[in-house]
Image (tube, grey):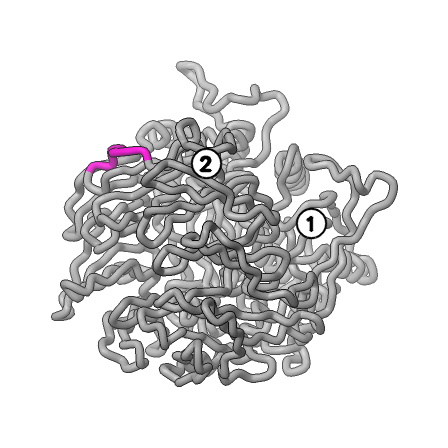
């Protein structure tokens, strides 16, 4: 489960867990579709939900930056998908065109492309077309090989669409997956195609591409790598034959329409291991390209263990293989010889509760070592090792969290990273040199994130704060600003006219726990009045909804919340225990009791809000999506009836129904932990208090529709009245056509009916 921020209807993440910004929202039927701010000289501008839906309040961003080898440039796909352009890291100005659909020499005529993959020496490019999504990170596409020097393009393969292709380090071979098998294309042999594996079969054997749960929870779409000398292909083989099948009934529906289901609905089946059930059995295989010899590498692994990553290192005799036990509290890093199969333990990392995903998925390898993020001190910090696993340097330390590692410059021995050193609510970009001198590179206080050039001479920085939309600048590695690419000044001016009073606050619960929150008050706020409150939250492990940044609120920039504020609501959000950026103790205190402290803290937040003189304590609502939906149900049945109503979207209702990797990381298995049933919305059904609206999509491959059906049955049997909205063939994102408009209109109407 990853927190989600939604940038558009097309970019809305499909999973619980990552954050997302949403531009497809809802609208007032009597407002013109393209309206933004409507005002006369003597009338306060009014936001419209249609304008939010059309992205009229969404910031402009720089997307798809791919740093190039010269250390001075980056490439991007043009907005119309017709060109790959080169731009300067110093000025941001376009300096050339690398690929153009209008001029490429090819028998295939393309109108546009979906993406591209550079070869290691940038002399060839894989051109991506006809992309079809599978799950959150995987897709199939038709790729073409583009030769930069002679401007020619030819198909990668005539055998059907491909998945997750990569170049060998020398750029002369391409590996890709198709129909659960792996293939090689040898560019020096007239693009001769070789099938590496033949045992791949849907719902049984997958070679090189992660199964659903490994893709979703280990954040990857590819599990194959070349050795450093390009002579061996290595991959993870997933045997999911014993993993239970999940079936979702699919109807004809609309937007898109599935005409094959016109007379009878059909089942979509895939392997989905729920908590406590059988996972795929994983092994690491190698294929020596010249001799065509395939081997199984001798990687020590528990029978029910995971291999979340394999990574090629600079040494052809060292394939880095990361293993993880099922409890996810012990990670081993092995250096494995892909020819002999011998594995040597280089590093072991343990935790008394669980390891964060970053400990084993964010290992970054360089010719002379690798960087690792670890919370072994109680706070996540950066460490530097050689390829044998010897700790060479503790790069950062202190009572704060490092959030991202950006790069290492071997020539100067400088490390570049982001951390919350200033405050858990703020993120800045830093550099630390070989003498441990730390230099802050981002000038502005708030939220900063960076993309560094190859060699770390320059970086592109995106900064925002509570009242300023993202500003994208180019800087050198001393922090000196070289150019401003996007300032979103027009958006700031527009938003300043409509957004209510934005505040960050901190309060202490009755348990003595200090929590952070944000609040949005109406622009005409009158402290002598009492206002209804809508509390939004996500609350999942390691997430963060309260920041000094533009990303606050369901759509970012408080856009949706400002619309609600214009209707007379105060909107608020509180990050309770279990959320991120405050260290391991604060984040992991929810271990084995997921939802207990999280819901307790939302009730505490509601009580604190209700004690403010300008808030009507009898009109406080709560809502959330995904984990936020789960915690909405938990908070409304916590035992203290503080919420008059709530909306739970795509909500888990018992962790027994969710996947092994995510759930067991925080709860262990149902066989080991009796809290699954007791600490759940279903277990607490009889305690539900307040009016409830349940919303779910029938084709949610992540949080299955069964969560909604089972909790609704529990409420029926507990004699709890509630409302429910179901969306046909919709996945976890619940969008497409008019769907999101309908969903959020439904939600707003519900709040208005229950709180006005």
User: Residue 179 is drawn in which quadrant?
Assistant: bottom right
Q: Quadrant of the N terminus?
A: bottom right
Question: Relative to the observer, which residue lies in front, 88 or 497?
Answer: 88
Return the x and y of residue 10 as percentages of the image width and height.
54, 40
When the figure is inspected, residue 581 is found, relative to residue 67, above or below; the finding is below
Whole-percent x, y for residue 686 in the image:
75, 64
Name the quadrant containing residue 487: top left
Q: Quadrant of the C terminus?
A: top right
Picture coordinates of residue 12 (x, y %)?
Answer: 54, 45
**For the point 48% across and 25% down, which residue is it?**
46
Q: Are marks 1 and 2 in contact (CB under 8 Å)?
A: no
Location of mark 1 (residue) = 696
Q: In the image, is residue 2 above or below residue 287?
A: above
Q: Is residue 50 above or below residue 663?
A: above
Residue 522, numbered circle:
2
- Report the magenta residues as a range: 91-97
Mark 1 / mark 2, whichever is N-terminal: 2
Residue 267: assigned label: none
């Amino acid at each position: 489960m990853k927190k989600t921020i939604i940038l558009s209807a097309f970019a809305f993440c499909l999973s619980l867990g990552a954050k997302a910004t949403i531009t497809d929202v809802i609208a007032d039927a009597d407002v013109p579709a393209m309206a933004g701010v409507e005002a006369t000289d003597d009338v306060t501008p009014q936001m419209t939900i249609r304008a939010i839906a059309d992205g009229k309040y969404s910031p402009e961003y720089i997307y798809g930056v791919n740093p190039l080898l010269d250390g001075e440039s980056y490439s991007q796909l043009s907005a119309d998908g017709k060109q790959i352009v080169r731009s300067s890291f110093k000025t941001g100005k376009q300096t050339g065109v690398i690929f153009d659909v209008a001029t490429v020499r090819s028998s295939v005529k393309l109108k546009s492309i979906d993406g591209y993959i550079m070869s290691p020496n940038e002399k060839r490019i894989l051109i991506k077309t006809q992309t079809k999504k599978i799950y959150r990170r995987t897709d199939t596409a038709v790729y073409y090989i583009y030769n930069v020097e002679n401007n020619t393009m030819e198909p990668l393969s005539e055998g059907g669409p491909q998945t997750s292709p990569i170049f060998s380090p020398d750029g002369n071979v391409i590996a890709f997956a198709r129909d659960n098998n792996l293939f090689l294309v040898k560019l020096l042999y007239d693009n001769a195609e070789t099938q590496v594996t033949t045992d791949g079969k849907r719902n049984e054997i997958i070679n090189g591409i992660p199964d659903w749960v490994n893709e979703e929870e280990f954040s990857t779409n590819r599990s194959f790598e070349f050795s450093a000398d390009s002579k061996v292909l290595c991959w993870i083989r997933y045997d999911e034959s014993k993993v239970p099948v999940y079936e979702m009934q699919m109807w004809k529906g609309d937007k898109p329409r599935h005409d094959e289901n016109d007379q009878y609905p059909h089942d979509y089946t895939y392997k989905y291991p729920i908590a406590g059930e059988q996972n795929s059995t994983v092994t690491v295989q190698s294929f020596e390209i010249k001799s065509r010899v395939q081997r199984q590498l001798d990687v020590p692994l528990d029978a029910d263990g995971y291999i979340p990553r394999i990574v090629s290192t600079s040494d052809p005799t060292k394939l880095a293989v990361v293993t993880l036990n099922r409890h996810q509290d012990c990670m081993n890093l092995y250096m494995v010889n892909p020819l002999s199969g011998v594995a040597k333990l280089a590093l072991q990392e343990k935790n008394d509760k669980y390891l964060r995903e970053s400990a084993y998925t964010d290992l970054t390898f360089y010719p002379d070592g690798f960087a690792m993020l670890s919370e072994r001190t109680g706070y996540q910090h950066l460490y530097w090792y050689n390829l044998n696993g010897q700790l060479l340097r503790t790069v950062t330390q202190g009572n704060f969290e490092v959030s991202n590692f950006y790069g290492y410059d071997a020539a100067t021995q400088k490390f570049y990273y982001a951390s919350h050193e200033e405050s858990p609510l703020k993120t800045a970009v830093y550099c630390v040199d070989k003498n441990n001198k730390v230099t802050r590179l981002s000038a502005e206080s708030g939220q900063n994130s960076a993309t560094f050039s190859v060699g770390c001479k320059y970086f592109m920085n995106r900064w925002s704060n509570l009242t300023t939309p993202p500003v994208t600048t180019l800087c050198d590695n001393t922090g000196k600003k070289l150019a401003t690419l996007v300032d979103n000044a027009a958006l700031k001016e527009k938003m300043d006219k409509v957004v209510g009073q934005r505040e960050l606050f901190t309060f202490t619960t009755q348990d003595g726990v200090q929590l952070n929150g944000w609040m949005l008050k109406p622009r005409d706020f009158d402290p002598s009045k009492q206002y209804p409150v809508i509390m939004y939250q996500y609350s999942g492990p390691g997430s963060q909804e309260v920041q000094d940044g533009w990303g606050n609120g369901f759509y970012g920039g408080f856009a949706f919340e400002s619309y609600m504020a214009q209707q007379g609501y105060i909107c608020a959000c509180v990050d309770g225990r279990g959320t991120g950026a405050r260290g391991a103790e604060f984040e992991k205190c929810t271990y084995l009791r997921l939802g207990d402290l999280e819901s307790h803290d939302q009730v505490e937040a509601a009580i604190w809000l209700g004690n403010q003189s300008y808030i009507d304590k009898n009109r406080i609502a709560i809502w959330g999506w995904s984990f936020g939906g789960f915690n909405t149900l938990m908070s409304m049945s916590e035992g203290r009836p503080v919420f008059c109503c709530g909306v739970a979207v795509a909500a888990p209702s018992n962790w027994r129904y969710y996947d092994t990797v995510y759930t067991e990381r925080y709860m262990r298995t149902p066989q080991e932990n009796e809290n699954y049933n007791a600490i759940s919305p279903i277990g607490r059904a009889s305690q539900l208090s307040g009016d409830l609206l349940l919303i779910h999509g029938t084709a949610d491959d992540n949080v299955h529709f069964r969560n909604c059906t089972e909790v609704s049955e529990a409420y029926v049997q507990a004699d709890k009245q509630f409302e429910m909205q179901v969306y046909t063939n919709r996945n976890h994102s619940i969008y497409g056509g008019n769907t999101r408009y309908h969903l959020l209109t439904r939600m707003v109407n519900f709040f208005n009916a229950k709180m006005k």
